[in-house]
Image: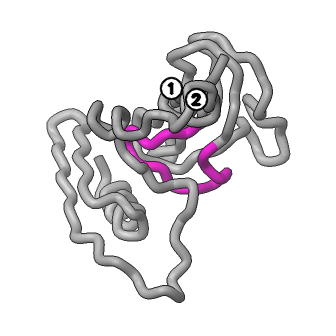
Amino acid sequence: METKNIEEIVNIFEKSNVAKMELEAGDLKIKLEKNIVAHSEDTTPVANAVYVGEQSDSTVADRKPAQAGNAAACEETHKAYIKSPIVGTFYQAGAVGAEPFVKVGDMINEGDVVCIVEAMKVMNEIKSDKSGIVKEVLVKDGSMVEYDAPLFVIGD
């Protein structure tokens, strides 16, 4: 790997909200870590690119609906996500000005390309690992995403 590529990776890492990253390319192994400090109120956070994290079973159990018929609360606990397998820049379409791979309301099948995540100038097609209807796009086009960050909400 060229020094220029390593510098680019470090620059992207420094500008991102990612706290830790490991990368292997052949014999080269890079580990990057930084402390993320809370920013002042005038700093604009990168909305839609922040990974909220998995919830433990006890947290889900604490969110039981107040009424048995409360479908909205039940649906919240059963959301399915398509998550990013890599750190990089999220793109909804294959080219500037092109139609997005998927839109809210589209029916997708397992294996369908749903977006692209660019990492180190390589455009990686992200394929769905589940079938269903796209309920929500969680990331703004052109935003940085972390490993395992939710990109789409999928439902029935």
Find the magenta span and give its range: 138-152
Taking 74 as reference, is 109 left or right? right
Label 2 belongs to which residue? Answer: 75
Answer with the quarter of the image where residue 70 lies. Answer: top right
Q: Measuring 79% from the left and 27% from the top, which residue is drawn there?
A: 105
Q: State the mark number for residue 78.
A: 1
x, y percentage for residue 50? 46, 55
> Is 68 in front, or is 16?
68
Query: What kind of element bears circle 2?
Result: helix
Taking 57 as reference, is 143 left or right? right
> Is 131 in front, or is 3?
131
Instruction: Reply above or below: 129 against 91.
Output: above
Query: Looking at the image, do the residues carrying marks 1 and 2 touch, with CB atoms under 8 Å apart?
Result: yes
x, y percentage for residue 29? 16, 44
Tell me which amino acid carries mark 2: Glu
Please state, as top left, top right, bottom left or bottom right, where the C terminus lies in the image: top right
Tell me which amino acid carries mark 1: His
Answer with the quarter of the image where residue 152 lies. Answer: top right
Magenta segment, principal secondary structure?
Answer: loop
> Is 62 in front, or is 20?
62
x, y percentage for residue 79? 53, 29
